[in-house]
Image (cartoon, coloured by chain):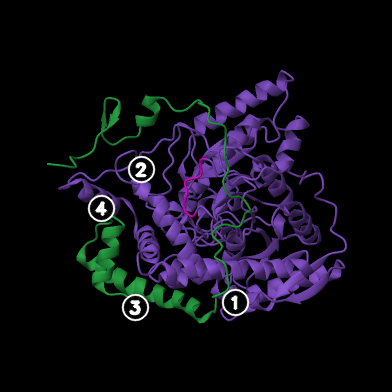
Amino acid sequence: MALTEDQVRWVAHLARLEFAPEEIELFTAQLSQIVDYVNQLQKLDTEKVEPLAHCLPISNVFRPDEVQPSLTVDEALANAPDRRGAYYGVPAVLD
Amino acid sequence: MELIDRTAYELLDLQRRGEATAEEIVQAFCNAVATRDPLIRAFLHFDRDTALEQARAIDLKRRAGQPLGRLAGIPVAIKDVLCTRGVPTTCASKILRNFVPPYDAHVIARLKEEDAVLFGKTNMDEFAMGSSTENSAYQITRNPWDLERIPGGSSGGSAAAVAACEVPLALGSDTGGSIRQPASLCGIVGLKPTYGRVSRFGLVAFASSLDQIGPFAHDVRDTALLTEVIAGHDPRDSTSVDRPVPPYVAKLDEPVRPLTVGVAREHFAEGLDADVERCIRQAIEVFRCLGAEVREIRLPHSDFAVAVYYLVATAEASSNLARYDGVHYGYRAERYDSMIHMYSRTRGEGFGKEVKRRIMLGTYALSSGYYEAYYLKALKVRRLIKEDFDRAFAECDVVLGPTSPTAAFRVGEKIDNPLAMYLSDIYTISCNLAGIAGISVPCGFTKQGLPVGLQILAPPFAEEKLLRVARMYERETDWHLRRAPWPPRGSPAGNGHTAAGT
């Protein structure tokens, strides 16, 4: 196994994903298989190769800092699971 | 020939000549959806009344002598990953079950400007992650050539809808083959434009450095038409490139001469089905007969493409899908103990298995201690893959090969083996990693009667040449004229009954 169940639980925490114990077991096996597969990249010598994140020769694209038409408050909040007036409702962060 | 079997081009012609109205055309396709979709299950959302209303409005404009758009009265189905104002957009995910976008994607606005009839939202693998459309939270879409088989994915609903003649044109998105592979498996044409050619504004993001929107159609002419409509600069997508869109349709019938086609040994590797190989070899012979020089080329790093893709795409996905937090839109879990628990339960319940697998893999590849070994390593090999294509295109105009190593597989065949599923994209993935353009065109059938697709790859922004080369092949063959039989193979209605599914 390339990955342990503890590692999978840690990654699940980082990704904010809740899993049932049997899912952790299944994912540990499946992700281990995939990680074993992608490990073939280690065979290649890439010491002198620059990483390529993006294929276009574009870096920063700027626009003038001008106010543009945008969504109304009602439109922006229309899909919120917990709308409270002009705000998004969330559970208490501090007790 | 029935209206529903025709191409968009023919339907536009019928309207111009006064032989059919937009309403008659849209009515015919609505009827096809009503009778066929209960078996095919391509559509997640379909609003017949609105489509007919749009059609009548176009007929009125025509009668009043007003100028009409280039897609006037033509139904176009939309993969449910593209935002449509006021129309549900779910990405086939439970987490977006009730999401109704407050704006249109750029390509949707373009379709409206050209008087197309927006014709429903199509099924897909959840968040475009998959190769069979089985990862939808809502339904399984069937291949119109054999109902026991998958239509490919992730844009399987769009491909199946066109192949079943429920709509003449459709839009999909392609991150690692999600337009070309289902086009191949459904016996139609599908194009992935160059990265940056079509604005991604309003496309729900999966892997932002790979995603592109593209068309599905029965033939290359319709593909060129729809590509011409959706391509072009849009300041709302900073990766959309500001360069003119060539007249793809006007130049389509000009053959590319001289033409050098590259054939890579790596595209005929272990795992390639013998019937698929036979069809591709025959297609290469067609080009030889047309006077093309066929040159053997090498793409030495293609064996690593799947591994690179499943690190780069998952890393980008883990970041993009962080926005589904149960706060701004979409599903929120009912019970939780804290803010963090609300996030993790919402996401645990709202995402399907494949999406969670990919978020996990991407999070792992980006996590402290693994970033260099996995994510950064993958980006370096990505450059080697791109350089393979730079060298190839220095000596040939296009690269030919199979779109998919096999024809359509059976429903359920690969769903429990993620790695086997990933390997079905082995020939399409490099195109996205290298940011180039690619098309799949029908090029024959297996002994079992399943369609096979020829993939043609071209350098960045060479869509015009790509479409002309594809058209050269199409003129010599009649695969694009075939339509899936109805009632389809494997249909419960049995043989000879025409009213299946009503």
Q: Which chain is green?
A: A
Q: Position of residue B392 (x, y in %)?
A: 72, 70
Judged by its main secondary structure, the magenta piece is: loop
Q: Amino acid at mark 1?
A: Asp
Query: What is the span of residues highlighted in magenta in the rendered image?
Result: B202-207
Answer with left or right where residue B476 lies relative to residue B278.
right
Camera sees residue A83:
yes
Above-or-below relation of A4 to B71: below
Q: Nearer the viewer, mark 3 or mark 1?
A: 3
Q: Residue at x 75, y 29 (%)?
A: B18
State whether discs 3 and 1 lie on one chain.
no
Report the Cα–Cα distance between label 2 and label 1. 38 Å
Disc 2, SS: loop
Chain under callout 4:
B
Q: Quadrant of residue A52?
A: bottom right
What residue is pinned by disc 3? Answer: A2
Q: Quadrant of residue B75?
A: top right
Report the Cα–Cα distance between label 2 and label 3. 35 Å
Chain under callout 2:
B
Q: Which chain is purple?
A: B
Q: Position of residue B83 (x, y in %)?
A: 48, 39
What residue is pinned by disc 1? Answer: B273
Q: Position of residue B502 (x, y in %)?
A: 47, 45
Q: Nearer the viewer, mark 2 or mark 1?
A: 2
Answer with left or right where residue B326 lies relative to residue B220.
left
Q: Residue at x 17, y 40 (%)?
A: A92
